[in-house]
């Protein structure tokens, strides 16, 4: 009798477990349910997340931000155990990886792939959580997503039932907002993800038009040399080649580093990556001394292939991250320590790149492409048409940005205008502000403007400033309460790029200082109200 009871109990437990896993595997994204003819709506995403919460204790949902149209941007925190607080993660043996989908809501692979990945890890691949804490935002741009239409991105090969819009509810591009931070989504990313959890790696998922090729998946690393270039070298020479190899050999997915032909007619001129400005989130992450991967899936591959390709890339990144988590964590800690030490006593050789030019990497790139032919249209214009004739080319890769102009790294900046828009933006970036506790005199570099012109065309709601001028050295008295920004802090590169007057993504460029650059009456310009103390100096400060 005892044996029979134990047998029945065993049968019930096993049956319940099988039934539970079987039922869990029926949790499908809208893309999977529709055989990849549709993408998920905002409600679909929330419903899917709620189903994940029912099947696993290893996921919780936080809110990154509330959009202009009133939608919460969800963040999945996945871990075993779940981190009780972000503070305790600083000493955790696990590594933190942040995955972001749908920043451009017409580019929807990341939304579907990241949800599928979360489900599969929680059901079948829980061992991953021994080494990784996953942060996943599947739908970073909910407002754009809810404008799904078959008239959006009509050149895109699916989903046939339409996709959302590129822009958010403010008609702004979220992937141009990393520095100026004028959207609730990006503000939330900085405050509720980057500053709070400090992920070692960010993956930002997109769809690219690009040049004709066979590879459905492309990806690359952060580009801006104003960040620590040892991180760029690590990504370019170590991590990305290994991820590419795993993606091809383990997950059977053709891939290529992101870019397009400089000239489709003449591939030998090279394959060029994306721009270097830190307004792009992946480049911004580099300025924060962290690793970032831009995933661009090929628009002319069918929707299912793009989603599965992105999913496989995420698996490849996780594989590499687990295997090399100690190396990555030690590298990032070393770079943070070096950044702080540099700011404590800057030398003549310490400099910040403010202008850069792209050059070839040391390794050429191989692309599976097609022969093209000219076709004359009815209006008489000629355009290139892809043929079915395949060809493989090996060409130089333009993805190594080299500084063409640098400025000295100061010991500290002095900000003489306490403008809440400026100070709140700096604080949102995680930059530490202090104030002078008493009046003081310092030798400073002052930027004297000689020419200031707005760009002729609006860019993200701004007529960006084009400024020219020169630095002069002078002794100057500063009032108590003057804001002090030291460069001996982890996000010094971000602070410097924002405060230097001549960068192409700083606060002056984005019009934050416009009220303070010209006199109310008369001609000429006022001194730029950010002064630089170059050498190590005793500064008596108090909290901002």
Image (tube, rainbow, N blue to C red):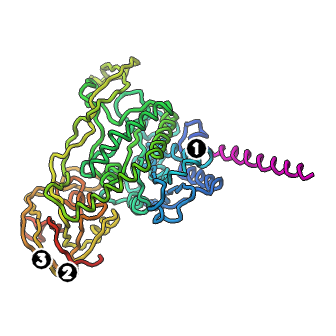
Which residue occupies the extreme right position in the image? 1
Residues under labels 1 and 2: Cα distance?
59 Å
User: Which sits in the foreground, 49 or 286?
Assistant: 286
Q: Residues within 10 Å of mark 2 (few under 14, many from 20)?
A: some
Residue 194 in view, yes or no: yes
Looking at the rendering, the stretch of residues picked out in magenta corresponds to: 1-27
Look at the image and say whether residue 162 sits in the magenta stretch.
Answer: no
The count of marks equals 3
| Res. 351 mark | none
**Earlier residue among tags 1 and 2:** 1
Tell me which residue sits at (14%, 79%) in the image.
440
Residue 243 figure quarter: top left
* Element on which disc 1 rests: helix
Q: Which residue is mark 1?
A: 30
Q: Are marks 1 and 2 in contact (CB under 8 Å)?
A: no
Can I make out residue 173 in this image? no
Question: Residue at image x 24%, y 60%?
Answer: 498
Where residue 450 sits in the image (x, y, percent)?
A: 7, 59
| Circle on res. 480 | 2
Which of the numbered marks, if any, corresponds to residue 441?
3
Work out whether residue 491 or residue 213 is closer to the camera in this orientation and state it: 491
From the image, state whether disc 2 or disc 3 is nearer to you.
Answer: 3
Secondary structure state at the residue bearing disc 2 = loop
Instruction: Report the predominant secondary structure element of the magenta stretch.
Output: helix
- Residue 412, position as x, y percentages in the image: 20, 67
Q: Is residue 413 above or below residue 454?
A: below
Residue 78 coordinates in the image, percent (x, y)? 54, 55
């Amino acid at each position: 009798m005892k044996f029979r009871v134990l047998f029945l109990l065993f049968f019930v437990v096993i049956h319940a477990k099988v039934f539970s896993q079987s039922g869990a595997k029926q949790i499908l994204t809208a893309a999977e349910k529709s055989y990849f003819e549709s993408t998920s709506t905002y409600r679909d995403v929330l419903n899917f997340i709620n189903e994940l919460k029912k099947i696993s204790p290893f996921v919780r949902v936080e809110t990154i931000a509330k959009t202009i149209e009133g939608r919460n941007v969800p963040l999945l925190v996945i871990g075993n155990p779940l981190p009780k607080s972000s503070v305790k993660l600083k000493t955790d043996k696990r590594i933190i990886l942040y995955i972001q989908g749908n920043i451009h809501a017409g580019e929807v692979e990341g939304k579907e792939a990241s949800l599928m990945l979360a489900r599969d890890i929680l059901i079948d691949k829980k061992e991953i959580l021994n080494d990784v804490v996953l942060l996943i935002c599947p739908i970073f741009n909910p407002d754009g997503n809810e404008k799904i239409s078959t008239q959006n991105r009509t050149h895109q090969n699916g989903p046939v039932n339409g996709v959302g819009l590129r822009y958010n509810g403010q008609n702004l591009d979220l992937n141009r907002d990393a520095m100026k931070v004028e959207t609730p989504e990006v503000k939330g990313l900085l405050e509720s993800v980057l500053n709070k959890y400090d992920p070692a790696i960010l993956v930002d998922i997109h769809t690219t038009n690009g040049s004709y090729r066979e590879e459905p998946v492309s990806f690359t690393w952060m580009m801006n040399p104003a960040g620590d270039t040892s991180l760029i070298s690590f990504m370019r020479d170590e991590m990305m080649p290994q991820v590419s190899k795993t993606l091809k050999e383990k997950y059977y997915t053709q891939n290529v580093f992101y870019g397009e032909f400089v000239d489709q007619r003449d591939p030998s001129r090279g394959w060029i990556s994306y721009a270097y400005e830190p307004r792009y989130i992946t480049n911004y992450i580099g300025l924060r001394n962290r690793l970032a991967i831009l995933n661009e899936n090929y628009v002319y591959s069918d929707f299912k292939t793009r989603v599965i390709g992105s999913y496989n890339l995420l698996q490849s990144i996780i594989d590499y991250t687990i295997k090399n988590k100690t190396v990555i964590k030690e590298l990032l800690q070393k770079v943070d320590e070096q950044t702080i030490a540099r700011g404590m006593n800057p030398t003549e050789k310490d400099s910040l790149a403010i202008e850069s030019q792209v050059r070839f990497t040391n390794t050429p790139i191989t692309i599976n492409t097609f022969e093209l032919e000219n076709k004359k249209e009815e209006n008489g214009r000629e355009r290139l048409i892809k043929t079915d004739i395949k060809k493989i080319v090996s060409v130089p890769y333009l993805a190594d940005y080299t500084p063409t102009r640098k400025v000295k790294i100061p010991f500290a900046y002095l900000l003489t205008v306490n403008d809440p828009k400026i100070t709140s933006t700096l604080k949102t970036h995680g930059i530490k502000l202090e104030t002078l506790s008493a009046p003081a005199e310092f030798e400073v570099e002052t930027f004297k403007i000689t020419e200031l012109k707005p760009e002729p065309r609006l860019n993200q709601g701004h007529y960006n400033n084009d400024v020219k001028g020169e630095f002069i050295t002078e002794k100057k008295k500063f009032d108590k309460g003057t804001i002090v920004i030291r460069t001996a802090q982890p996000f010094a590169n971000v602070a410097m790029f924002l405060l230097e007057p001549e960068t192409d993504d700083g606060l002056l460029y984005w019009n934050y200082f416009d009220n303070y650059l010209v006199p109310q009456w008369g001609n000429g310009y006022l001194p730029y109200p950010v002064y630089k103390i170059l050498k190590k100096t005793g500064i008596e400060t108090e909290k901002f």
